[in-house]
Amino acid sequence: MPTQHDQAERRKELEAFITQCMRGLRHQVRGDPEPFLAVWSHADDVSILGAIGSYAQGWKDVRTHLRAASKTLNWTEVAVQRLLTTLSGDLAVTVVLERMSNAQAARTLRVTHAYRHEEEGWRLILRHANQVTPDDEAREQAILSDGSSGAL
Amino acid sequence: MSTLTEVPADLQTFMDNLHEKLRGHATRSDTRPFLEGWSHTSDASIMAAVGGYHVGYDKLSELLLWVSTQLSFDTYEPEILTAYADGDLATSVELEHFTKNDGAEHMTLRTTHVYRREAGEWKLLHRHAEALTPVAGMNSTD
């Protein structure tokens, strides 16, 4: 049974790792996938449901997916807004919004990440990301304001 | 490296029950039982297929009740791709297959669920779902 001190240390390590993930992500979305690939677990059960669409499972396919996606990206600014962090034992989850932009465009991704503490320390095991559009946000606001607008 | 997680028996039971409740939500607009499976906390969140994001049980329940009035699927079949669990936290990655009009219309969502054990009972803490869009050369159901 982990002590409170162990849990506090584990959370501290997790926060440092999340910072490392975000550094890697900034490279990933500028066409340089290797720093982001370095934060992933190499296990058979890792998964990506990326913003590009589809999904991939297992380290080899996840790596292929991330390298292919990175080639298409050139976001120069990335800001992350954390909505949720939860940790228990060797598993942790964050829910975030990633706001990306360059001189021509901007996008916001809604993202769920899962992390696992493995022999080498924390590793990323899941990324689920897709775009939030202004239309989505306006429609949901309408739904929640009068309960009758919008379309599924 | 292979570390596929074995899902604890109580979590498997919860996930099975949750799938039945989701079926009611998606096919019969019977959303109250599905809502009972959610954590009723302020940090519960949803990134629903309808779009956007909401934090807190009050907001997500309002959204789900509205969504259920718009749904008219005949069938719902979940397909679990993988699950991770440790301590009081778990996550599953699933495809959700929906059909209507005798299968003439279909939709597949790619979904991540996060579960947390609260006061000894598993609860759904977060749902992230949107339509699966196939990409050439990558996995898809097409």
Image (cartoon, coloured by chain):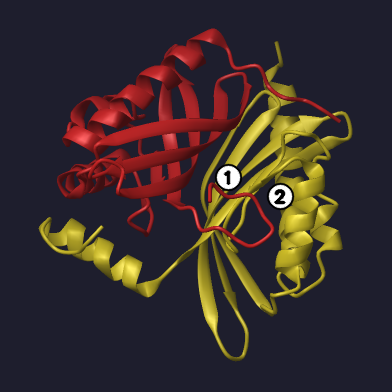
Chain colours: A yellow, B red
Q: Is residue A147 left or right of residue B1?
A: left
Question: Residue B120 falls in which quadrant of the image?
Answer: top left
Please give the name of the residue rendered at 34% of the width and 34% of the height, measured from the top-left corner: B76
Please give the name of the residue rendered at 72% of the width and 62% of the height, measured from the top-left corner: A25
Number of the label disc, if any, that sits on residue A94: 1
Q: Quadrant of the N terminus of chain B?
A: top right
Q: Is residue B61 left or right of residue A26?
A: left
User: Where residue A43 sits: x, y (%)?
Assistant: 80, 35
Measure the alpha-carbon separation of dots 2 and 1: 9 Å
Query: Marks 2 and 1: CB-CB under 8 Å?
Result: yes
**Mark closer to the chain start, 2 or 1:** 2
Label 2, on which residue? A18
Number of the label disc, if any, that sits on residue B31: none
User: Where residue B48 sits: x, y (%)?
Assistant: 37, 50
Question: Residue B32 falls in which quadrant of the image?
Answer: top left
Question: Residue B98 falls in which quadrant of the image?
Answer: top left
**Tag 1: amino acid:** Thr
